Image (cartoon, coloured by chain):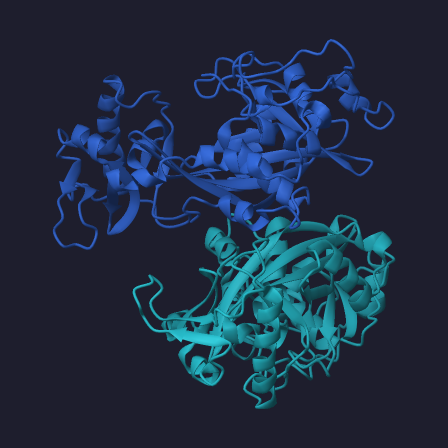
Chain colours: A blue, B cyan
Amino acid sequence: MVCDTYHVSQKIRQPLASLYNSKSSPSFIATFPARTSSYRPLSAATISCSSFTWDDVVRVSQPDYLPDDSSDLRGYFEKIKICNRGSQKQSDFFPFIVEDQIVGYVHNGFANQLRGFRDVFVHSENNGSGYGSYMTLNSKLRTPDERTRAVGEVIKCLGEEELIPGIRNELYPVSSSFGAPIFFSLERAAAPYFGIKVYGVQMNGYVERNGQKFLWIGKRSQVKPTYPGMLDQLVAGGLPHGIACGKNLIKECEEEAGIPTSLSSGAIAVGAVSYMDIDGYSYKRDVLFCYDLKLPEDFVPQNQDGEVEGFQLIPVTQVANVIRRTKLFKPNCSLVIIDFLFRHGYIRPEFFGYLDLLQSLKSGDCS
Amino acid sequence: MVCDTYHVSQKIRQPLASLYNSKSSPSFIATFPARTSSYRPLSAATISCSSFTWDDVVRVSQPDYLPDDSSDLRGYFEKIKICNRGSQKQSDFFPFIVEDQIVGYVHNGFANQLRGFRDVFVHSENNGSGYGSYMTLNSKLRTPDERTRAVGEVIKCLGEEELIPGIRNELYPVSSSFGAPIFFSLERAAAPYFGIKVYGVQMNGYVERNGQKFLWIGKRSQVKPTYPGMLDQLVAGGLPHGIACGKNLIKECEEEAGIPTSLSSGAIAVGAVSYMDIDGYSYKRDVLFCYDLKLPEDFVPQNQDGEVEGFQLIPVTQVANVIRRTKLFKPNCSLVIIDFLFRHGYIRPEFFGYLDLLQSLKSGDCS
């Protein structure tokens, strides 16, 4: 997977100027030494997602790395688009219905894979029900436990045949909307094949120093199965069955960044973003609950579970440049950071496209 | 206009307990003396919008005034509903089109009032244009200035006949979306009759003291033509033609609350809310740009333009109670305060209906 940076090769690149004031930013200096020489261009040809370094990130984040305009929102719109592909292919999917509620969407082709499991999945042709053609569960499966077990067996088979890769043995709740009754639970890796909504928590950890805000950014481990080596929030995680958002966040804070409960309990819920992404048989409908945590200046995150290669503290204005100019972030992190940029006044009504960008942060079914 | 409070008369009211810690909240104490006696019940029978006092507001805001639950979002949903009436009556309106763009909606009945002004307004019957029946401007009116002048003459006539009451001699821009080309400008009082989108700025001014947040709340003057005596944001104003959001906010900060530029320039844009409200011939499509301003503890707002009766500093948790429990706020202020409650963590994903309420803050066309 190659993550080329936008526009970089077409535009004039300038040597780095030192942005870092050692008087006001001592710990930032510690992680990002000022570079005024040894300039190395960053371009689509030289950077892949798994090979870029923090130095590359800092370089491309500099205000004068490109002669672009921070009020130009197009780079953000491009990142929103990457999370919301394939809307024109919605007609290749039909509803997955449980107890008269739409809980997901299944691709025609994937439905064919399920035909061999008639004790579990039933494909109802258009019978005037109002839904047209739809997929449902066999009516013999009455309780959430029965459904979870039966569907789990099917997923196991499909996993062994590599029709559903990357089985994680982690169950996600299946419902029509957040907080509604849970009809059954489904293996996380199977969620996009059934188009069920998946909920997660993502936290921006920030530091304020002399009125300037900095974000702690993570870089994913090279051995992560998804998006290895890419940039990430300080803390993020899916919301498995049976755990509340706030509790899950505190757990993830500890595991991913070594943030003790005494600090993570100060995280505040600030809203949500959503997206819908169709790619082949996969229909992702993700809703991410966003949190902010203002951290003490002297706190340094330490990954505990081996999933993060390292963290760096970067001025918010420069994180914004990385989002606008590159694809170095795991795609859905862009939404959560753009949401932060809105709420903290970095994106302003005077910037052309303000309201459209704001709305695009909830392009998926945010319910 | 009578503003009854919700549920109050049906539930047990408890005597006030003193919430105010004079050690931690000296200026709050100065404006709200603690009341532990002289309890006077507040009910639909005793309170109208124009007659309630700050003491009434404080009383109903107390945690123990009602045995309700701050995680119950129904009181907030009710306030959203008040701003979004009449959606089932959309079919009584047809599009108002300028230069092939929908800029508004006009009621059948109001369109009849415009029939006498054929040099200005043209009613096109369903002619296969794709819009069905629609209202447009006479094609002889080519420039924004020509349109503004001609439409202005019509509005003047309709104002004299009291078909459009409350003419303000304030022009609002007419466009298909924010930042798009402006086709002409329209008298503010006429905006809902043409269903054009109207943009405004609203600012929550808050103070943080020992980790607790307080909101400065205004009470509108009794002589305001709209919503006299009701509660309001610290600062709010419509966005007239030709002024940017940030500049307009700074102007309103000075006029409405005596906030000097040295402070108001610290206001940050934090997003937007929208609503659509149909009432008779009126179709309001408002988009409010929201701002937060963190004020110094010792700053006390002073109204300059006579439009505000007074200000009080109230703990955010208690402002939330006033929103949930009463109709004492000017309706659209509820949206802006609920948005604040989301962004500052007072409304959390664990509360049933979180995502629905979050989405409902943009029930109108937010573009």
Q: Residue at x 69, y 54 (%)?
A: B291
Q: Above or below — where is A226 with respect to A102? A: above
Image quadrant assignment for residue A37: top right
Residue A194: x percent and y percent?
29, 36
Q: How many marks?
A: 0
Q: Can residue A111 be seen?
A: yes
* A141 relative position to A66: left or right: left
Q: Residue at x 83, y 36 (%)?
A: A210
Residue lying at the far bottom of the rendered structure: B161
Q: Above or below — where is B83 with respect to A292? A: below
| Towards the viewer: B353 or A64 | A64
* B226 relative position to B139: left or right: right
Quadrant occupied by the N terminus of chain A: top left
Q: Residue at x 75, y 53 (%)?
A: B293
Q: Above or below — where is A13 with respect to A84? A: above
Image quadrant assignment for residue B147: bottom right
Residue B360: x percent and y percent?
49, 58
Residue lying at the far top of the rendered structure: A38
Q: Above or below — where is B344 with respect to B94? A: above
Q: Can residue B295 be seen?
A: no
* B156 relative position to B204: left or right: left
Image quadrant assignment for residue A118: top left
Q: Residue at x 79, y 69 (%)?
A: B32
Residue A203: x percent and y percent?
59, 35
